[in-house]
Image (cartoon, rainbow, N blue to C red):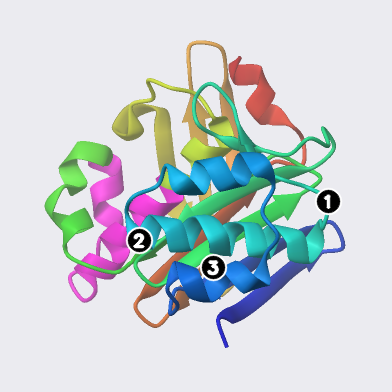
């Protein structure tokens, strides 16, 4: 079954995961596309991207049957209802859709050595210490995913990951939480991320219940 998992964080916030195991033709019967969605799908030539497009909208309609996804000027997804927020992520294995009544960001990544190879590009000197000798690829991927979630929460172009999206530390109470900050010319805000390890996948998310992300303009 393609639908894999649903994580309800509270009555207003959830993360849904769809395992990418079908071709686009297999997903079409699950969904009635709007005219705009049909045009968007026709303009996607890559089969995996087509599958991601369809799976994302199937997940959306499971929760909000009447909604469709639009994109703002920086390419961030949003819904017509201004009281609902969404974030979308893809990995090699999954499509992930998060919704909340608060601004949010979600990311999912496949654990691999790429993040480790480019770690110095997106991490500051103080953050390198969070990459352990025992699980370097996993830790680097987790750090990258965390910053991707912050970036999706911020929805702002021109952000330098190594200097403006900062990871301060990990919780030691078994809750799998990450303390982080966003720094821009307008504000300095603190945020708490949560992560989950699922085999070779890293899932991270952040919910901004205080709407602090708006301080960044």
Residue designated by label 1: 66
Mark 3 or mark 1, which has the lower sequence index?
Answer: 1
C-alpha span from label 1 to label 2: 26 Å
C-alpha span from label 3 to label 1: 35 Å
Residue designated by label 3: 176
Residue 109: percent from left, percent from top: 37, 62
Residue 170 visible to the viewer: no
User: For this view, does 189 lie left or right of residue 183?
Assistant: right
Residue 2: percent from left, percent from top: 55, 81
Q: Which stretch appears magenta? A: 124-147
Residue 37 visible to the viewer: yes
The answer to the question of whether label 2 and label 3 lie on touching residues, with beta carbons closer than 8 A, is no
The answer to the question of whether label 3 and label 1 lie on touching residues, with beta carbons closer than 8 A, is no
Q: Is residue 201 above or below residue 168?
A: below
Q: Residue at x 48, y 11 (%)?
A: 185
Q: Residue at x 22, y 55 (%)?
A: 115
Residue designated by label 2: 47
Question: Which dot marks residue 9?
Answer: none
Classed neighbour count for the residue bearing mark 3: other residues with Cα under 10 Å, few (<14), some (14–19), many (≥20): some
- Camera-nearest residue between 158 and 165: 158
Secondary structure beneath label 3: loop
Secondary structure beneath label 1: loop
């Amino acid at each position: 079954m393609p639908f894999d998992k649903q994580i309800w964080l509270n009555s207003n916030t959830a993360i849904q995961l769809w395992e990418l195991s079908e071709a686009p033709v297999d997903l079409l019967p699950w969904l009635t596309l709007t005219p705009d969605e049909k045009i968007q799908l026709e303009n996607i030539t890559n089969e995996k991207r087509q599958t991601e497009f369809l799976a994302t909208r199937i997940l959306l309609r499971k929760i909000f049957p009447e909604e469709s996804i639009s994109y703002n000027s920086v390419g961030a997804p949003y819904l017509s209802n201004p009281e609902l927020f969404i974030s979308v992520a893809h990995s090699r294995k999954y499509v992930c859709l998060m919704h909340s009544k608060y601004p949010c960001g979600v990311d999912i990544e496949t654990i691999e050595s790429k993040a480790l190879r480019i770690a110095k590009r997106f991490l500051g000197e103080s953050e390198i210490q969070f990459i352990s000798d025992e699980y370097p690829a996993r830790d680097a991927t987790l750090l990258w995913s965390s910053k991707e979630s912050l970036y999706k929460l911020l929805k702002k172009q021109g952000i330098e990951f190594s200097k403006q999206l900062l990871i301060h530390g990990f919780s030691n109470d078994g809750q799998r939480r990450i303390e982080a900050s966003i720094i821009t010319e307008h504000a300095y805000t603190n945020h708490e991320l949560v992560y989950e390890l699922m085999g070779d996948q890293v899932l991270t998310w952040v919910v901004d219940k205080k709407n602090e992300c708006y301080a960044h303009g």
